[in-house]
Amino acid sequence: MQLYQNQHINIYNSLTGKKETFKPINSGYIGMYVCGPTVYSNVHLGNVRTFMSFDMVFRYLKHLGYKVRYVRNITDAGHLENDADVGEDKITKKARLEEIEPMEIVQRYTVDFHNVLDKFNFLPPSIEPTATGHIIEQIELISKIIDNGFAYEVNGSVYFDVHKYNETNDYGILSKRKLEDLIHNTRALDGQSDKRNPQDFALWKKAEPTHIMRWPSPWSDGFPGWHLECTAMSTKYLGEQFDIHGGGMDLKFPHHECEIAQNQAAKGQAPVNYWMHANMLELNGARMSKSTGNIINPAELLSGKNDIMSKGYSPSVIRFFMMQSAYRSVLDLTDAGLLASEKGFNRLMNAVDDLESLKTSNNSSFDIKKWKQNCYNAMNDDFNTPILIANLFEVVTHINAIKETRATITADDLKLLKETISTFVFDILGLKKTSEDNASGTDKLTGAVELLIALRKEARVNKDFALSDKIRDELAAVGIQLNDGRDGTTFSTN
């Protein structure tokens, strides 16, 4: 018997706005599609948080025994600058600015994307299709939508007729927006657009003479609309109806709304049973933004080479920090939060290590089986990793009590405890011990510097300022800066 037969998951469905009991279309099998990156720049931490959430979902579903086909695409064409139907293709623009081929841009940032996700211990998806690899499927999909009367061609470009679609369907069913409100809040066309209505969106755009990325089609040499690729690739690999579609909250409208409309228009049915959206990542209480300078990239966060954090953090500490927040909650990235997570992570790893030396007794003072089910209950409740982690720390307390002979555990329960902790900590949360994280020296360095900080503090209390200054200067000489603040002394590395 597979675990999924007695572990029942409730998923918050963005489509209905409530938690629903998860029932896959085909028993024992799950099709899951997640919108991947547009590879025109380095992956940012907000993307990492979104993909990490669905990596966790993927891991848990696999653990339960489901056969999961996880499809996460690469957008390598068609994503225009303002996410609408005007402006330059993001990849083409970057290639023009750097005076290289667009596919060189695609290759560079696809490699970066994979390298970053590898650092954070992501499992690879089952299939990772690209938009440019599925031009034929997208052209066929456009033809179906035209034949069904929901799209029109003007001057070589093809647009989805939102108003025609809304006569028999609900454009806004996912985002809960009404077409009437969209009309009211949209400025009138300037007379130069080929669209019949501002709300219509491009399925195919005719390429300007200078546009490098272009393909032949029945309508023009051009390129597909951004929304179209996910419809084409998700249904190609998962079927016309599949179980889960995920992505960031920012994609709900218009991207995911348009996906639903395209599927309905082409095939007469909704494509997805459960829509899942991961929420935003903020930095120090504000939206991440290049224009304001309130931004940090993964490499800077890992290395500590930035002006925002006091030090660098290992990938597993960052992952642990992100898993301490529910995927549907806004998460605020702060130095204080990461420092607290680092302490919690180290406490958890120490308890894992202590399992190997625990002495067993004839009875257990803690109900391990009940605790184990509580861990499953947390994950079954819309993948509630914060509650799961709270359960893990509950058992850490008991591990420490057993170590100090204030509590007992039987040999069978100890075996079950080891297996359960390994499953939830490493297999499902995707954490790694820092020594496996290529950060084995981080904790040792932190401990040594904190000892020196304590000695320096003691020297200052004793008015031994010469020793205090010597500690500070010697550390600075090897690239470790001490930062004295109201809340104490922290350090950063160059």
Image (tube, rainbow, N blue to C red):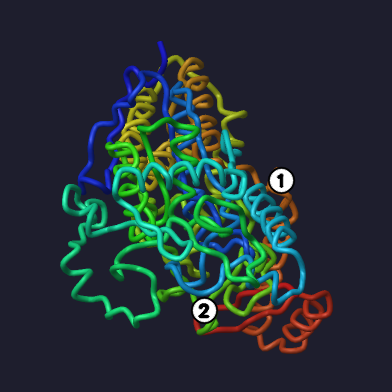
Q: Which image quarter holds the N terminus?
A: top left
Which element carries disc 2, helix, strand or loop?
A: loop
Q: Residue at x 20, y 57 (%)?
A: 176
Q: How many labels does the image show?
A: 2
| Residue 381 visible, this angle | no
Q: Residue at x 39, y 57 (%)?
A: 255
Which element carries disc 1, helix, strand or loop?
A: helix
Identify the image quadrant of residue 454. bottom right
Q: Which residue is tagged 1? A: 435
Label 1 neighbourhood size at 10 Å, few (<14), some (14-19), many (20+)?
few
Residue 416 lies, with reference to residue 131, above or below; the image says above
Residue 63 lies, with reference to residue 348, above or below; the image says above
Residue 235 lies, with reference to residue 210, above or below; the image says above
Specify the amino acid type for callout 1: Ser
Badge nearest the viewer, 2 or 1: 2
Identify the image quadrant of residue 48. bottom right
Residue 196 locus on image (x, y percent): 30, 68
Q: How far apart are marks 2 and 1 (CA)?
A: 31 Å
Give 467 or 81, whichever is nearer the viewer: 81
Between disc 2 and disc 1, whose residue precedes?
2
Q: Which residue is drawn at 59% across and 35% down?
A: 354
Q: Which residue is tagged 2? A: 294
